[in-house]
Amino acid sequence: MKSGFVAILGRPNAGKSTLLNALTGEKVAIVSAKPQTTRNRIAGVVEVPARKGVHPAAQIVFVDTPGVHKPGSHLDRRMLQEVYEALETRDVVLVLMDATRRVQLEAAAEPATRVPQVSTLRPGSPESPKRERTNWASEDEFLFGLIRKLDCPIFLLLTKIDLVAKDHLLPLIDTLTRHFGFAQVIPVSARKRDGLDLLIRKIVEALPVGERYYPKDQYTDQPQRFMVAELIRESILVETGEEVPYASAVVIERYEEAEPPAPPRKKSQAPARLPLTRIAAAIYCERDGQKAILIGKGGSKLKEIGTGARHKIESLIGTRVYLELHVIVEPGWRESKTFVESLDWRNQLERLAGDQITAKPPDEDGSV
């Protein structure tokens, strides 16, 4: 058997999350037309059955990362750090380039002399985001600089090929391959699933022999409550415009899982109604004006956000959902290191575990 980690890199709106969802067959990452939708690295696990004479069985752990862009706030720098951390543990790297977008790469000089070069990317190292150059000639060049010294197979994926003429692809491939010697160049359309079978086959060929990292039936590393927060944020992205989505963050404050329904006593009885999961979440924004937009006239916008999110959450967890939302103004939260770090679901899990350990035990009568 083969197994390994595959990091997915790309500029904002390159189609990384759409590709991850198509590969896993599950809603692992939220998707919107707005750039910088992904804020955390997200793993999607794909079990690949053996194909006799083609490849052995494999488990591929795809790691979606935030889009590579120039950081303008602490949140942006934290998102870039997520990219660096994904590259610390990788067996293959996929570089996604949107086939509908013009690539901004200088062709005159040797690219390696003009962009940062990284191999091991650890916080506090000279190559870490805090000391990274921010006057890149283009974000495409910075993206190529990230991969230039990585010692693993790197695939170029041209995405959204269903939206461009085929005669547009060859010049684009020529431009990109003159800047880097990719192990594979694969045009794909996640929406139409074009090229995905070939991509899986080539990845399996490149992976090392190893054991599974996750159980066979697990398709992501994300806890359910984080996925719920992301679905609420996706609803905000859909229902609001301009700066509001980028200044918004979602934190789950209460998550009461539903008890399974009792089975019917007789076969003739109708099945019990689906159980109810109760969720309360806070939507953070930076200014009173943003709060007014999120709430809307008479609470209409918040209701639309909640309704859209509730349907997606019910589909995810398989129960009815009672969703309570409220909006909190946290001025300048994107520049607050403490607040930004608190949004990471890994940190949230640590805090929840600590709260459970330090919680006062109940008295004998059950009171606290």
Image (cartoon, rainbow, N blue to C red):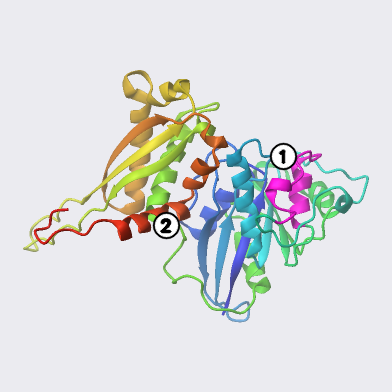
Secondary structure state at the residue bearing disc 1: loop
Residue 168's spot in the image, x, y percent? 77, 44
**Residue linked to disc 2:** 350
Q: Nearer the viewer, residue 300 or 183?
A: 300
Q: Nearer the viewer, mark 1 or mark 2?
A: 2
Quadrant for the N terminus in the image: bottom right
Q: Nearer the viewer, residue 164 or 37?
A: 37
Residue 259's spot in the image, x, y percent? 20, 56
Label 1 crowding class (10 Å Cα cut-off): few <14, some 14-19, many 20+? few
Whether residue 302 is visible, yes or no, is: yes
Q: Nearer the viewer, residue 167 or 156?
A: 156
Toward which corner of the image does residue 75 lie, by quadrant?
top right
For badge 2, the amino acid type reads: Glu
Residue 209's spot in the image, x, y percent? 61, 79
> Which region of the structure is painted magenta?
125-147
Label 2 crowding class (10 Å Cα cut-off): few <14, some 14-19, many 20+? few
Q: Nearer the viewer, residue 72 or 47?
A: 72
Residue 15 vs 151, above or below: the answer is above
Which of the marked residues, 1 or 2, is nearer the chain's N terminus?
1
Q: Left or right of 257: which side holds 155?
A: right
Task: Give the residue furthest to the right.
Answer: 108
Residue 289 vs 144, above or below: the answer is above
For badge 1, the amino acid type reads: Arg
Whether residue 167 is visible, yes or no, is: no
Q: Residue at x 36, y 18 (%)?
A: 297
**Residue linked to disc 1:** 101
Return the mark for residue 364.
none
Residue 228's spot in the image, x, y percent? 39, 47
Q: Left or right of 359: which side holds 194?
A: right
Secondary structure state at the residue bearing disc 2: helix
